Image: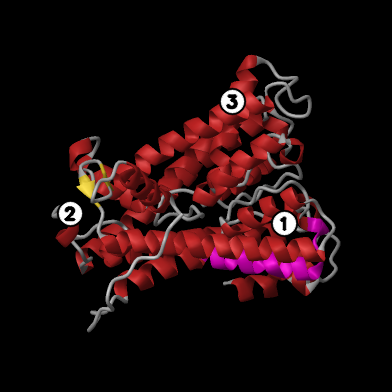
């Protein structure tokens, strides 16, 4: 998909001025679209022609739908390794996916995708047509583009300033937020909701962790942005109370994986950027379009730490304990992700004169397929752009690949070494 997108975006018909696109620019944009990230090196609204923008929309629609489908199926098939579902460990979930389940999941993905995108597109189109200076055709295009981009957590906007022009309009921002939250939960959670409705006790451990973790992280993001940006003259400072609350809520959702911005991210306080580092790194739910290490992975690590502090033998949440395999897989995913981001940031720091905090933000945003930027993406040299391309690709397919491989590749060990513990701390 990335190769095909690069080819199509390289055509003269894809640009507004009819000139061929440099191969690196086409590759960067195609990777960002297929990986549903949203980082850009050229302005989507002005650089690309309607054909080019249509290609980008198609890329992140197919990328998001295909990734959601594959991630859901791999996650459920892997069972204990990815979805925290293992009959032997929890005695509550099946450990594999049969043909009937596969068909059910695919149908669920398709139905939810079409329904949510259609509803959000209708709301945005109506609002843009009635309240703003848009023809019906323009309103329809922008509505559909942002609806598909939001649901797939792509972060691409058909406006040069993302959605900053609508920072006081809840009718535009709230539907985008809802679409992002729905798909960031992941389809295993949606399947649980379909089968068990709101009966909390019948939900899987995965769904409980994802929903509870999402609520906690949204609250942390909202409170942080509101408190840290309250008096910032370049962000929330000049706004009234209602707009401050709206934009704080919007920017508590977007760092989780979506990449739209109603405020100038480059003007955020350093403390706000640091909070965004954490939110972007964690990401959203497994088996959806969200990036990052995933909420369940982070929750497992938190549970391990708490169990060690409390001197408990087992780590777990919601009345269920985790298997040791899950704990090791979570540690592996986080360690590899941290090492990758550290290495990429170090390389970018050595090859560019840009501020370190901006480069770190860029690296985390790329790996977590968020798409937010402080505005330095277009200033990166070719080598830096290639690093970001690699991060977006690895961030999209890497965590699920590693987690699934670890879950399915376990082999019995025929011997064990004598035990001896080094000094820790």
Residue at image mark 1 = 40
Along the polypeptide, which appears first: circle 3 or circle 1? 1
Residue at image mark 2 = 90
Q: Nearer the viewer, residue 159 or 16?
A: 159
Q: Which residues are magenta?
A: 378-396
In the picture shown, does residue 226 fall above or below 272? above
The image quadrant that residue 345 belongs to is: bottom right
In the picture shown, does residue 414 fall above or below 37? below
Q: Nearer the viewer, residue 54 or 45?
A: 45
CA gap, disc 3 and disc 2: 40 Å
The answer to whether residue 171 is visible is: no
Q: Position of residue 207 (x, y in %)?
A: 30, 46
Quadrant for the N terminus, please.
bottom right
Left or right: where 245 falls relative to 108: right
Mark 3 falls on what kind of element? Answer: helix
Residue at the (72%, 48%) spot, across then down: 357
Is 401 included in the stretch rendered in magenta? no
Q: Residue furthest left?
A: 91
CA gap, disc 3 and disc 1: 26 Å
**What mark, if any, has residue 246 been given in the picture?**
3
């Amino acid at each position: 998909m990335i190769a095909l997108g690069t080819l199509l975006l390289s055509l003269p018909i894809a640009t507004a001025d009819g000139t061929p696109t440099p191969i690196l620019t086409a590759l960067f944009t195609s990777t960002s679209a297929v990986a549903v990230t949203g980082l850009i090196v050229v302005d989507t609204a002005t650089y690309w022609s309607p054909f080019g923008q249509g290609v980008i929309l198609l890329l992140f629609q197919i990328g998001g739908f295909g990734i959601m489908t594959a991630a859901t199926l791999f996650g459920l098939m892997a069972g204990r390794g990815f979805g925290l579902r293992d009959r032997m460990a929890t005695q509550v979930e099946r450990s594999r996916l049969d043909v009937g389940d596969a068909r059910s999941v695919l149908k669920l993905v398709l139905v939810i995708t079409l329904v949510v995108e259609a509803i959000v597109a209708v709301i945005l189109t109506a609002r843009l047509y009635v309240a703003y200076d848009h023809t019906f055709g323009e309103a329809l295009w922008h509505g559909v583009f942002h609806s598909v981009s939001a649901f797939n957590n792509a972060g691409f906007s058909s406006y040069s300033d993302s959605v900053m022009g609508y920072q006081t309009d809840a009718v535009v921002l709230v539907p985008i937020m809802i679409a992002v939250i729905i798909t960031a939960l992941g389809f295993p959670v949606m399947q649980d909701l379909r089968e068990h409705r709101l009966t909390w006790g019948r939900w899987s451990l995965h769904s409980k962790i994802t929903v509870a973790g999402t609520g906690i992280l949204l609250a942390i993001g909202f409170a942080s942005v509101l408190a840290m940006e309250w008096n910032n003259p370049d962000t929330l400072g000049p706004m009234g109370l209602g707009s401050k609350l709206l934009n704080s809520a919007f920017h508590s959702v977007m760092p989780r994986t979506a990449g739209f911005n109603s405020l100038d991210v480059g003007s955020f306080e350093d403390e706000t950027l640091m909070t965004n580092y954490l939110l972007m790194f964690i990401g959203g739910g497994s088996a959806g379009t969200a990036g990052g290490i995933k909420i369940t992975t982070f929750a497992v690590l938190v549970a391990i730490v708490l169990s060690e502090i409390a001197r408990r033998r087992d780590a777990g949440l919601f009345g269920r304990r985790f298997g040791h395999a899950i704990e090791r897989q979570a540690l592996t995913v986080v360690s590899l992700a941290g090492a990758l981001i550290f290495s990429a940031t170090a390389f970018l720091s050595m090859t560019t004169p840009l501020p370190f905090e901006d480069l770190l933000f860029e690296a985390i945003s790329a790996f977590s397929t968020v798409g937010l930027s402080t505005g330095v993406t277009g200033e990166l040299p070719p080598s830096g752009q290639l690093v970001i391309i690699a991060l977006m690709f690895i961030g999209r397919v890497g965590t699920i690949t590693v987690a699934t491989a670890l879950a399915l590749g376990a082999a019995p060990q025929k011997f064990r070494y004598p035990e001896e513990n080094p000094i820790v701390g």
